[in-house]
Image (cartoon, rainbow, N blue to C red):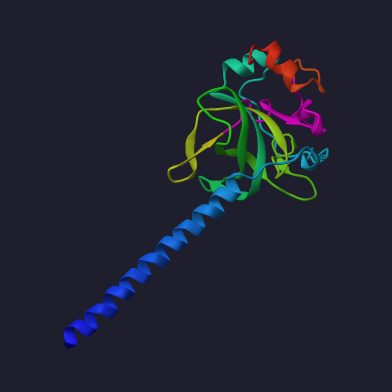
Amino acid sequence: MKTKRIAIPACMIAICLCIAFLCIIFTQQKLFDKETNVSISSAEILLPEKNTQAGLEASLSKSYNNIQDLKNDSYAIVLGDVLLSDKSIRYNDHVDLAISDVKIIECYSGNMNPGDIISIEETGVRDDQGDISIDGVPLLKKNMRVLLFLTEPNNVVQGDQMGYGIVGVYQGKFFVDQNDQIYSSSLYSDHAVSLIQWNDGDSIEKFKKEFSFN
């Protein structure tokens, strides 16, 4: 009889623990879903301020003078919203990388889907007085909407988590305003020079039509 009295409470405790564990998992999943379903309204879209700092000096491995060449060298091309921009890592003990999480709105090229969240790597350090970055081009920040030409994925970010660089360092990065007008990233730095033939203020729709992304 004593054995039975002990066994019954033990079973009940085990069941209660299982239920509690499942509740925790369910709650975490709901929080994750809530976070990944975040969308940026047009009123919240942030454009960078012009950076007057000289920034990091680096020779670009390739200078692009047109969108078609960027397209040809891209692993993927996406329009997305920056959800998080508070991470950074030091790669190989001497290169600072700013990491941003971007939620894809549209994928124009590559095997990605709307709603996917990807990590973007940029060389530099975020600073409220002006980003310390290649040629002073502003780094991605939360609530920015961006058109990105991406390199092939790598696992620099953390373990098995894959990250993507930007083709041509910053040449494959364009900022988008609340009216879906596109601006080259070099426009927001006193020290960056872009040879890409692009009319700042052109629309996403014009971009898709001109480069056969419809």
Q: In the image as oriented, which residue stretches furthest toward the bottom?
A: 2
Residue 205 horizontal/vertical position (percent): 73, 19
169 above or below 10? above
Q: Main secondary structure of the magenta part?
A: loop
Q: Residue at x 23, y 83 (%)?
A: 6
In this rendered view, identify the residue nearer to me: 196 or 31.
31
Residue 174 horizontal/vertical position (percent): 72, 28
Q: Residue at x 61, y 24 (%)?
A: 61
Residue 177 horizontal/vertical position (percent): 79, 32
Which quarter of the rendering shows the N terminus?
bottom left
125 above or below 118? below
Confirm whether the magenta stretch covers residue 21. no
Which quarter of the rendering shows the C terminus?
top right
In the drawing, does residue 20 fall left or right of residue 49? left
Total numbered labels placed on residues in the image: 0
Q: Give the quarter of the image for residue 180.
A: top right
Q: Give the quarter of the image for residue 197.
A: top right
The boundaries of the magenta stretch are 165-194
Residue 4 horizontal/vertical position (percent): 19, 82
Q: Residue at x 63, y 14 (%)?
A: 69
